[in-house]
Image: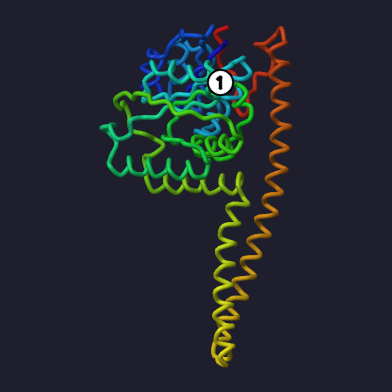
Amino acid sequence: MKVIIQIPCFNEEGSLPITLKELPRELDGVDEVEWLIINDGSQDKTIEKAIEGGVDYVISHINNLGLAQTFLSGMTASIHFGADIVVNTDADNQYCAKDIQKLVDPILNGKAEYVIGTRPVKDIEHWSFLKKKLQLFGSWVVRKAAQRNVVDAPSGFRAITRSAAMRLHVFNRYTYTIETIIQAGHLRIPILNIPIRTNKEIRPSRLISDIPSYLKRSFSTIFRSFITYDPMRFFLIPAIALLLVTIILGIRFLYFFSIGEGTGHVQSLILALAIFVFSTSLFIVGFLSDLIAVNRQILEGIDYRLRKLEAHQVEDSSQNSEHAKVFNRAYLVYSRK
């Protein structure tokens, strides 16, 4: 059983050494623990600090592609290097590394495939009142979209099985946290929340530095994911609501028509017909989107099988270190082995 701890990095020469000092090299129930750094186009000495800190692998993007693509590159590389469990944490030492064992235990015990570290949001001193409320509200929205009990949706402290990692895709360029939860929920991947501890802030958050922009991007991700993974429910609910409005307006017109005042309420009939056309259009769009979603699920199944086949081929290769040094949009910079 191998665990790879991956850390997305962008200009983290100051905080990365602190984070690496706290990472475990041994975990109960695990044979091997390795560290992987994903350098997202850093312009400082992030790579040098990672190697000095004893990491096993460093992969790098030539340009800064954002957190979502960095996470995806790390997942692809971790699978390539034989990880049975991938643990994701941040380079700013926000999460208590001693709690990695807590994330891994439910997977080892067969209780989950996707474990999310839940931060004590109400007790984090350096978070503003507004940030705490936005985090709680955002997690509530994600729970509804994913149909899973997720307490801390934006948390980047996670453990994911090899099988689950192969089934997840990230299309958003901003962050992976919300999209992968919604996706995992609809794929019925078992998700579990585990309370974890946090450390004192050593640098301000880059992801939520601008709250209006963060809100816009986050809800755009939720909106897009909801349409992608549950299009029928997204379109059917408003279609039914508009159909009820059509019926009410139609009954209203028929009532006045029956008492001889129909000519004065023709506008109600016209409005009812217009709403009915719009409602029908929504239903048709929802139906077609649902067919597309079914096709997407078939393609995801094929992609999963191809990933498994590719992973087995890598494991069987006697030249593992020289077999495919490109992971998604990243390339191997350093390997300790």
- Residue at the bottom extreme? 260
Quadrant into which the C terminus falls: top right
- Residue at the left extreme? 125
Question: Residue 145: x percent and y percent?
Answer: 52, 44
Residue at the image point whose x is 28% and y is 32% from the top: 123
Question: Residue 330: x percent and y percent?
Answer: 59, 26
Residue at the image point whose x is 58% and y is 53% from the top: 234
All told, the count of numbered labels is 1
- Residue 237 to residue 131: above or below: below
- Residue 173 to residue 309: above or below: below
Q: Is residue 262 left or right of residue 126?
A: right
Question: Residue 135: x percent and y percent?
Answer: 38, 40
Name the quadrant containing residue 72: top right
Quadrant into which the N terminus falls: top right
SS at badge 1: strand
Name the quadrant containing residue 189: top right
In the image shown, does 26 or 90 lie closer to the viewer? 26
Residue at the image point whose x is 69% and y is 25% from the top: 307
Q: How was the colour assigned to the protein in this rendering?
A: rainbow
Tag 1: residue type? Answer: Ile
Q: Is residue 112 left or right of residue 155?
A: right
Question: Residue 161: x percent and y percent?
Answer: 57, 22
Q: What residue sits right under mark 1 in the picture?
A: 59
Q: Residues within 10 Å of mark 1 (few under 14, many from 20)?
A: many
In the image shown, does 285 or 7 lie closer to the viewer? 285
